[in-house]
Every structure is written in C-alpha cells, then in structure tokens.
Amino acid sequence: MTHVLVTRPLDASRQLAEQLDANGLTAIVMPMYTFAGRQPQAGSLIDWSGAGLRKLAVFTSPRAVQFGLPFMPLPEKLADIEIAVVGSATRASLEAAGYPVHVQATNGFTSEHLLQVARLAETPGEAVIFCAPGGRETLEEGLDDLGWKTTKAMVYERVTLQPGSDQVNNLRTADDMVSVWTSISSLKLAQQYLPADVWGKILESPALVISSRIQHYLLELGASRVELADGPGNTELLGSVLRLTGQQAAG
C-alpha cells in the first residue's frame, strides 16, 4: 500500500489524511511546525489613517489573516486602504471576517503570480506584508522593484515540531511512498530532524509540491522526482496525489 507523507499544519494534514484514507492510501501525518502570534516589530506597520500615499495591506496565508487582522482598522474604517492576497484560501478567510479583497492574481496562487497583477504597478505607495519571520522575501523584493515602500509585519511565528518515533518508523518501513510539501520551511526542518536513512528515502521517492520555487529547492537537494500539484488546497493536493499514484478518486 502506498503511504503519503503529509507535512501541512496539523488541521489541514488531518483533513487531507481522511481524504487519502477514503481513496485507499495511508497518510503519515507529520506537521513540522505549528503557529503562535507575536507583536510586529516597531516601524513595520503603516499609519493607516494618514493621508497621501496609496496604502496596501498584503495577506499571504490564512494564518496571516488570523494573526494580522488585530493590527488592521475595522472593515468600516478602511477608507482608501487596499487589501491584496496570495491565494483563494486567504481571500476566503478575509471575507469571512468582513474584509474586502481588492487585489488577487486571476490565475495562480504564489507570490510571483500576485506580483504580475498590473494594478500593483500603478502609483505605488506604502505596503505592509503580514507574514512570519524567514519568508516572503520574493514578495517584498518584487513590491520594492515595482516602487512600493515595503515592510514586513511579522505577526506570527512558526514553532518547530520534531518528528516522533512512530512517524519515523512508519516512514522507514513504508514500501511505497509519496511526500507532499507546501513550504520550504518544512523541508528544512525535515532534513534537520529526520535520520539520514529516512531523509534519503524521501529524496528517492516521488514528491509533490505546490510551487516551482519549492520544486527547484527540492531538486537541488537531490530529489529524484518532483511534480507540481494542481493547487495549494487539499482538494487539489488529493487529485494530484491520486494522479501521481495512478489511483482513481473514490465516488
């Protein structure tokens, strides 16, 4: 039986695991981190009430929405503030909280796709990216190149979760395996904390990733086969895993 290593945050991993199980695949749930809120550093936020330059708030994930909204004006006080998002799940989180979304890539779900939106190149002003430490450099640099004065408000952080002995043993004894990766951070932690033989087995097995950036990173580590998923959500990941393993979706 094919085992699928799932490294998403716990809730998302469990949901995907249930869908994989319904399709005859065995999931090994191994989130590499959880999240905790933090105060953004001084000077990283815009004076939202100030007049003048165009103001843009960029949310990069549902976690950025969860931890970043306390630092935003209420929806009825947004005035001329624009909100941009990376990905439809981020948009859904904002809209569920009553916040409008003004800028999103028509196609694609990565920072690179957002940077291609023509509206971002028009009269750039001040931009804040709500994110965690150690990420979104591509987005920050891209906005800077478009003429924005950009800061990163680090409103949450990743808390490392080390693999347990059961997870390691399941990986070691799995006959056929596919791994699913949705962040480079997870890859770095897995390489750091997994035994060398288990990490080597992951590199030798097919992998599924959600962006060309992660694909390139994993190939540089020596992975033998890395394919791009249809999208970042569990529905797209499930379909991609089934295609990669030659399975048919359960009716």
Image: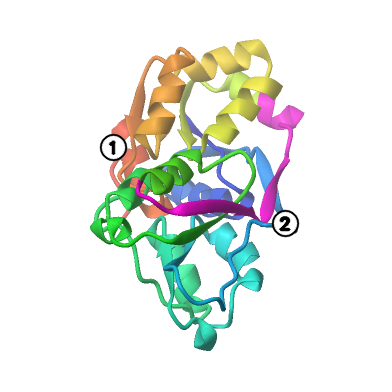
Residue positioned most to the bottom: 76
- Disc 1 marks a residue whose amino acid type is Arg
Q: Dot 1, how many residues are within 10 Å of its Cα: few (below 14), some (14-19), or many (20+)? A: few
Q: Which of 20 and 192 is in front in this view?
A: 192
Percent across and percent down for residue 191 are 62, 21
Kindly tell me whether residue 245 is visible in this rendering: no
Q: Nearer the viewer, residue 24 or 12?
A: 12
State which quadrant residue 188 falls in.
Answer: top right
- Residue located beneath label 1 in the image: 243
Is residue 151 magenta-colored?
yes
- Residue located beneath label 2 in the image: 42
Q: Name the residue rendered at 41%, 35% in the picture.
A: 209
Q: Give the range drawn in magenta.
A: 146-168
Question: Circle 2 — which element?
Answer: loop
| Picture quarter with the C terminus | bottom left
Image mark count: 2
State which quadrant residue 230 falls in.
Answer: top left
Is residue 41 magenta-colored?
no
N-terminal of the pair, mark 2 or mark 1, is 2
Percent across and percent down for residue 53 are 44, 68
Percent across and percent down for residue 143 are 41, 49
Percent across and percent down for residue 122 are 28, 61
Position of 219 compared to 49: left or right? left
Question: Circle 1 — which element?
Answer: helix
